[in-house]
Amino acid sequence: MDWAEMDAAEWRRKYLEFPWNDYQLNIFEKIRDGLEDHLMVGAVAGSGKTTLLRGIVAALPASKKTAILAFNSHIARELRDEDKRIPGRVTCCTAHAMGLSLLRGYFGGATPEVEDNKYYRLAQDSYQFLLRECSKYEADKLKMTEEELEKKYPIPPVKFPETSKEEKARLRAFFRFIKNICSFAHKTLSDIDPSSLEKIISYYDIDVPSSIEPRNLEDKGKKDNEEDSLASSIKADLDEFIELNRRVLYWGIRSAVWCLKKGNQVARENMVISYDEMLYLPYAWGLIPARKDYVLIDEVQDASPAQLDLYKKYASQGARLIMVGDPNQAIMGFAGADAYAWHRIKSELNAFEMPLSVCYRCPSKHISLAQTVVPEIKSAASASEGFLDTLDHNKLPTVAQSKDLIICRKTEPLISICLKMISQGVYARVRGRDLGRSLTALVRKACKQEAVFPNTFIEVLNCHCKSNIDSLMEEGKEQAAESLRDRWRAVKVCFKSFHEECSDLSEFCDRVEDLFSEDQNVSIALSTIHRAKGSEANRIFLVGSNYLPFLFRAKFGWQKQAEWNLLYVALTRAKKELIFVPYPTEKEPDVSNYLKHPLGGIKLPQTPPSLSSQEYRENKKEERQSQADEDLDEVEWSVAQAKTLEQVKNPESEKKNKSTCSIDSPIASESAAFI
């Protein structure tokens, strides 16, 4: 029987004849009996979530209004346009598309323009105000005492020189910094004030760009004693350098506040929105979706606070939510998703949970490994035994074949392997253009002058990264420090491989970014485990098996759980062969012993690490207490800054000190965002 060719009516009559497993049949029975509560389906990796959604639609009463909120547009198109089994009466789209339809209703049927670069453009506009502030500051320096100047300008404005390509690149990085703050603020439904945005930067490790070098390194090298190394001269300027970065952070945050408020106004008046605003504006403007009887939600464990708000609006109108996902694949907390989305929504909506535990993707040997992390996952009765093996990382570039997938927890090993494959004429690329941009952002932040490339590039890069890693470790941001360390090593691999072929720093950065691509037609794709979620291949090479799970930098309970989840995702990508590839680290340059280990050095848990509801509550309490301790220990940048923050919170106080409001914004009510 050709199930895929059935129309909706025939599928509805015959869907129970499909070879469902007992878990799926139990779910259909629960639905046919009538849902008194919201339903959450805990679907393990490879369990056929999309197929289950088709069955649920057939099990629901045809007279009821139903919507499917798919995880991405590809799945939405597949269900809506290509699958005849989903009837036309069922609304099928992504959460963002649903948010866009709410905005369309708000604008009387007109569709707002979605401009992905909206907040980059607003950041450029905000910089014009900042330049005028800099001009006023320079003029006041000539006629004011230091005390008067400090009183008027608690944190001096920052300016980015634009005389060279690298300086212009740093200014663009400043604009992207502001845009990123706005994006995370929209995803997380953050309050629009400096304090809240600063916490976002810290929590999501948003990279703060630099502006200028305190002194010209080449000139300084000539003036210092010959025995002083370049690294020593940079360290001598470190306090001044940190002060400049602090000014970038301060004014970047205030620029973001202005952009967020201005962006809201632009949306109302000009109908121009960003992608993130598809969900944020319905929240901010209190828009309510059309009533539904049932709403089916895919991949709920990776929902952002903005998405969760939409789901709860449906529930508040009486809709029954049927949410499918896998809490053990919640790995996108770093990208704005709510790390506790599954547990939070189950608790808030008092939802009933049912399992979907059979994996149809992986062989039985692979499932046995995955069960040490997620005991409930089971292999299908028809599953093959599968193949497990270890491989020397030096042999990987020649062993890997077309359509294999190479995955790793870190970026640096992927780049090293990719470069070796390219040198052998293989069309290989690392997935994720934004990863490439994060590496070049580090390069431009560390090396502020073309003159350092290539002669003193590594020395300058090393000094920059070491000092920043030390600072992050002192602040207790271990995972952020490890992320920077990974990017640092990746840049050094690129430098060693092709710096001699690059005429200047800009060309080097272009070569780095060219290693990364979203092209689906590459011969061999390399991917971080994060990006491999949702992917599968007949043969998977798991590079860096010897440092999985990567727990030693995890600070909070949710971070530790995310690392176990990453291991689980890695173990459930292969359909036939899973090859473990130990990879050397600074502490363990010799990994030959791990080749004798059947799993390439993976440290499986003694007991399953899955997060229970009780642990969820305890971890949230732990995280809140840690944040409270940080807030108590945090030293204010200056007394003047504290006064400035008070002005933002208390407009009446600001009016009394109106003379300090020095940015000449065309929107008077919004200019206070900079102050």
Image: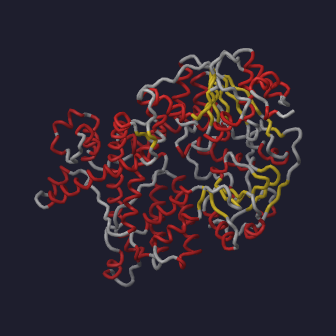
* Horizontal arrangement in the rendering, residue 557 relative to residue 324 (left or right): left
Frontmost residue, 427 versus 126: 427
Spot occupied by residue 482 in the image (x, y as percentages of width and height): 55, 57
* Horizontal arrangement in the rendering, residue 215 relative to residue 574 (left or right): left
Spot occupied by residue 338 in the image (x, y as percentages of width and height): 55, 37
- Residue in the picture at 83% in, 40% down: 379
> Please, is residue 528 above or below residue 313 in the view?
below
How many numbered dots are placed on residues in this image? Answer: 0
What kind of colouring is applied to the model shown? Answer: secondary structure
> Please, is residue 353 above or below residue 384 in the view?
above
| The N terminus lies in quadrant | top right
Q: Is residue 185 visible?
A: no
Identify the image quadrant of residue 607: top right
- Residue in the picture at 57% in, 24% down: 348
Identify the image quadrant of residue 620: top right
Q: Residue furthest left?
A: 143
- Residue in the picture at 51% in, 53% down: 480
Frontmost residue, 528 versus 150: 528
Q: Is residue 48 visible?
A: yes
Frontmost residue, 52 versus 108: 108
Spot occupied by residue 98 in the image (x, y as percentages of width and height): 54, 31
| The C terminus lies in quadrant | top left
Spot occupied by residue 498 in the image (x, y as percentages of width and height): 57, 75
